[in-house]
Amino acid sequence: MWARVLGSAAGGGFPQWNCDCPRCRAVRDGSRPCVPRSQSSIAVSAGRQQWFLINASPDIQFQIEAFGALHPADGSVTRMQSVLLTDAELDHTLGLLLMREGRGLEIHATESVYETLTTGTGILRTLEGYCPVTWRPVMPGTEMMLGEGLSYRAFDVPTTKRMRFPGAAEKGRVVGYRITDTASQRSLVYLPGVQQITPDVLEELAGSSALLVDGTCWRDDEMPGLGLASKTSRDMGHMPIDGPDGSLELLAPLPVDRKIYIHINNTNPILIDDSPERLSLDRRGLEVAVDGLELEI
């Protein structure tokens, strides 16, 4: 199985258009070693012929053009088969509207996410005005075939983040995906949003060969500390990396071959290659995703 990181930043990308924090200044003026990043999404494939997206960011057109394996073949035959959604956040779903020129889209989503995208944000209702949309209900805890050589199992990720569009079911608002190569039985876990790594969530990570996990903020009070927002990382639905109750302490001991932070906010110091925070991750065996990173699993 192969996985390609199409985008590795959180919503807004890196740099973020309206931000002048130290990290955004550094990537703009080149004063520190760091590279721009687009908004998070990955593509997975069993044989590099059929590809499946997990989330569709607003940067999807640029991300497809940057990855030749996703370019259309034989005139206009797309290599992308469907899109799996972890939640209904705009930075994970707005790219669906940019895919309206296709002959049709197959969307894998929980009932809660589907309801939000239909009656809340209206993204799927709008998309259906341009192309056929097929909804494949995602049932957490159930193994489902994805395509030739791949299966997936979604798992529920509890969150107390405020619902912007009330009415959808609470369960299934946020999920992670465990993608498995049916030939080798090796698996990848994609978890770009997690407020708390509970024992149940930790169990879902066990035995995986690679983990792409929420690295939004280094500290819980990162954005308030910079004067950029009043909400903490956990208020926004993301577990911070640092601290005794941060994700690093739980993830570092896991016997997983590749442990990689993704969905990284523009304020996070791990975006700077030589920062003390980045070096501390290196020492503990965790990586930081960058656009274009490819994994063979």
Image: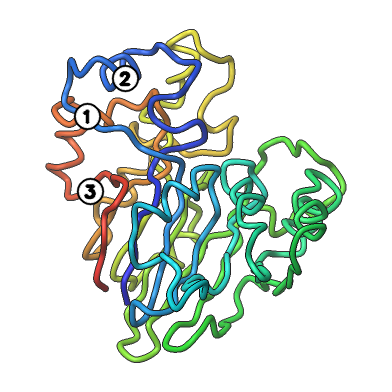
> Which is more toward the observer, 103 or 250?
103
| Residue 286: mark in rendering | 3
> Which is more toward the observer, 212 or 36?
36
> Which is more toward the observer, 267 or 123?
123
Give the mark nearer the N terminus: 3 vs 2. 2
User: Which residue in the protein does label 2 denote?
Assistant: 23
Q: Residue at x 34, y 91 (%)?
A: 183
Q: Residue at x 17, y 31 (%)?
A: 273
Relative image position of residue 283 (x, y in whole percent): 12, 42
Give the mark nearer the N terminus: 3 vs 1. 1
Query: Callout 3 environment at 10 Å: few (<14), some (14 to 19), or many (20+)?
Result: many
Relative image position of residue 262 (x, y in whole percent): 37, 46
Distance between mark 3 and mark 1 Cα atoms = 17 Å
Q: Mark 3: which secondary structure?
A: loop
Q: Quadrant of residue 69?
A: bottom left
In the depicted structure, whether residue 4 falls above or below residue 232: below
Give the mark nearer the N terminus: 2 vs 1. 2
Q: What colour scheme has been applied to the protein in the rendered image?
A: rainbow
Please identify, in this view, whether the residue under mark 3 or under mark 2 is nearer the observer: 2
Q: Quadrant of residue 276?
A: top left
Distance between mark 3 and mark 2 Cα atoms = 20 Å
User: Which residue in the protein does label 1 denote?
Assistant: 34
> Which is more toward the observer, 98 or 216?
98
Q: Residue at x 47, y 18 (%)?
A: 223
Q: Is residue 208 left or right of residue 147?
A: left
Relative image position of residue 294 (x, y in whole percent): 26, 61
